[in-house]
Image (spheres, rainbow, N blue to C red):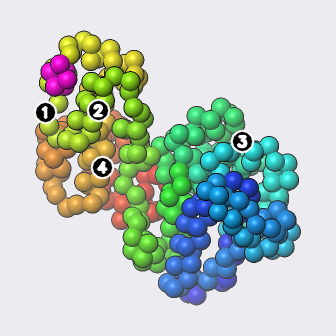
Amino acid sequence: MPSPAPHTVAVLLYEGVQLLDVAGPLDAFAAANTHGGRYVLRTASLDGGAVRTSSGALLGADLAVAGLPGDLGTLIVPGAPDWRPSVLDRRLRQALTGLATGARRTAAVCAGAFPLASTGLLDGRRAATHWELAPHLAHRFPKIHVDADAIFVRDGTFYTSAGVTSGIDLTLALIEEDLGADAARAVARHLVVFLARPGGQSQFSVRSRAGRPNTPALRAVLDLVTENPAAGHTLDSLARHVGISPRHLTRLFRAETGTSPARFVEQVRLEAARTLLVTGTDALDAVARHCGFGSAETMRRVFRRELGVTPGAYRTRFSTTAGSPHRRAP
């Protein structure tokens, strides 16, 4: 590829921002500069001063927002775990509106979707954020189409990503756009991360969405299934394992997790299959057996119903970030 022109990347800092939302993308872009990139990295706060991050660390800024060029290549909007102050800050909203309007592309990491949404620039667009925050984003900004499972989403010149480390996934996709798949792959190897992360955010929430139920028996069942999805889990066998009736176990599942035992088992198996498909080379029959589906055909039906693709197609999509099912075209 021909040598690219210099490309200014600016990260907007504000009080309470999450440090990793800032450092992850910056380190990925910096690594790309050893693989043909010409990224000029800058951090800017409203007045040019340091900000206190959510971890308590003080983070310095290179300059004030007013000192940034008007034709930014990439604007990065990191998130803050306590996102509410960011959507109420008028100065931040005004600065963000001006920067995002002039930037070639704007990328919000995790809860950074909230201050970006407050500008109105995401209205009518698809957007992602941390799965725990997705309901809040959808409620606060009903004009946005929130994708609670995507690792990152592109809609026009706006990019939004899921929680925290997914800012690196998003940055790798931006690097691939600019420099090609080989450069993005080299950066991913350097950072020891997936070029295209297997699975959506649901891979982190099948067990965690269930939380810590109040009933010890139910917690034991959830842990048993998660630890060994390949076992022959049935309603009767799970109930016997914890010494309660199948009917009572079903009631506990509904009351404390909002799902059924069969659905939970299937989702855990699907999660396991996603990971095996992109981290190994086993045949589909073997993957199905290892994950408890029994046969490749059963696994294929679940993939088609839940993800809209076959297991084979899912595996091949992870050769580059451009093929990732978590990236949405405009």
Which residue, given by chain and number where applicable, does mark 1 sit on? Answer: 232
Q: Nearer the viewer, residue 253 or 33?
A: 253
Percent of width and height locating residue 115: 72, 49
Q: Is residue 290 left or right of residue 54?
A: left
* Residue closest to the far front: 56
Given the image, on which type of amino acid does mark 4 rest?
Answer: Arg
- Check the image and report above or below for 32 versus 124: below
Given the image, on which type of amino acid does mark 1 rest?
Answer: Gly
Q: Residues within 10 Å of mark 3 (few under 14, many from 20)?
A: few
What span is colored magenta in the figure?
238-243
Earlier in the chain: of badge 3 and badge 4, it is 3
Which residue, given by chain and number where applicable, does mark 3 sit on? Answer: 84
Given the image, on which type of amino acid does mark 2 rest?
Answer: Leu
Which residue, given by chain and number where applicable, does mark 4 sit on? Answer: 274
The label on residue 222 is: 2
For the point 27% across and 36% down, which residue is it? 223
Determine the secondary structure under disc 2.
helix
